[in-house]
Image (cartoon, rainbow, N blue to C red):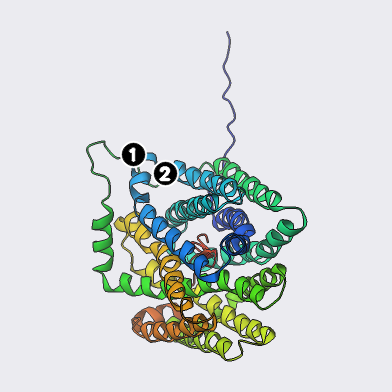
Amino acid sequence: MHVRHPVGLHTVPVPGAGTFARLFAIESLARSLLATVISLQALTLLGDARDVSLLFTSVGMAGLTASLFIPRIVHRLGQRWVFTLGGGLLIGAAAGLATLTIPGQMAGMLLRAFGAACLSIVSSLYILQYIRRRDLTRSEPLRLQVSAAAWTLGPATGVWIYQEFGSGWTYALSAVTSVGLLTYFWVLRLREGSPIRPATHAPPDPMRNIHRFFAQPRLRLAWLITFGRSSWWVFFFIYTPIYMVQSGYAAIAGALLVSAGNAMLFVSPLFGRIAHRYGIRRVLRIAFFCCGISTALCAVVFAEPVLVGTFLMIGALCCVALDALGNIPFLRSVRVHERAQMTSVFRTYIDVSELVLPALLALLLSFFDLRSGFLAAGAAMFVFAYLSGHLPRRMGANVARGEGRTRIVRTGETADDDIPRAAVAGSGEPAD
């Protein structure tokens, strides 16, 4: 008699903090390689900082509109395929930018922004699905630290390869890294957050989600705080390389300065411990205020690039404190049954910052030089320092007892992306 023996199946470990840290690190490397290259290439193609600002404004407007429809795409395709779409868009972005034309530049920047939004939103949903709230104090700083290496090495490495070996090699390396990201993601075999909905269920309405989000005061305040942080990183990533080039330095000097600013991410756990002792509200207010002072002082010493670089590093350190803590108000305020819809709206702080700040700078640069941008960015940080004082005292007390320290992506993260930028960004990457 023939006996069929059971077939041994390979058991895939349940994803944890380390899994999402590795996934985010690969994504961060794919995006950080182009973070500084994009603004420098735009300056080469357009020839003027004002026109670069207008380009980023146009891309930000299109990216914001597109990102609001991601919940509908998730509804139809599922989280797994939207993440795959995001990785594919990063590959397409590299191809568009490699054409070295203005249309290709615009297309590449738009694909990159939308791809980062897909990855950020879906990554946030997976983290909320797999990581318990009380474990965020471990998982999010871990993601931030792991991605810090990518955001420290990526900008300078991308520009160095761009200058030494040609632009094609930089974009090819970014595309290959994106392929590695998708390969690792599919090896993980992450499950969907919820069963497939019946076809009769209406897909999420973006406008209804926006209204629902901003009708909640705590979510509204959480969005404003992260918008302020992201705006500073947008300024830092776009205008630091431009300032260095206009001051007579080589392009690699601006890239190294950006990488040095991102290296501050390694000290982010320190701010978690400080918040554990003094509370999140106090740390956020002081960080915004100090960031505003250091940025405004750059305008005072505008003719001294070394001093400007020093003050920018101080500002980056302060902004890392905002990265390390800025996502907590949202994570602690969002309702479980609204995670997908509210996360998609919350993540728009990246797209709006990439829209509003370049638009403001384009207006200022039409009449003044770049020092006006430093003054405007510094003044904005003072406004957000004031807004941070409206955080509930109870939330700060809870964090002070150790219930949550986290990081949101820049692109600029990053979560994520960059979300940086590190928990859901970064910008994240730091708001790239």
User: Image height check: is 36 above or below 187?
Assistant: below
Q: Image check: 130 left or right of 165?
A: left
Decide if residue 16 is on the left or right side of residue 163: left
Element type where label 1 sits in the image:
loop
Amino acid type at image mark 1:
Ile
| Residue bearing the label numbered 1 | 196
Q: Amino acid at mark 2?
A: Glu
Q: Give left or right: position of 375 versus 334.
A: right
Residue bearing mark 2: 192
The quadrant holding residue 327 is bottom left
Query: Residue at left 57%, top 17%?
Result: 4
Q: Are marks 1 and 2 in contact (CB under 8 Å)?
A: yes
Q: Quadrant of the N terminus?
A: top right
Whole-angstrom CA distance, mark 1 to mark 2, is 9 Å
**Residue 89 location in percent, x, y?**
51, 46
Which quarter of the picture shows residue 313? Answer: bottom right
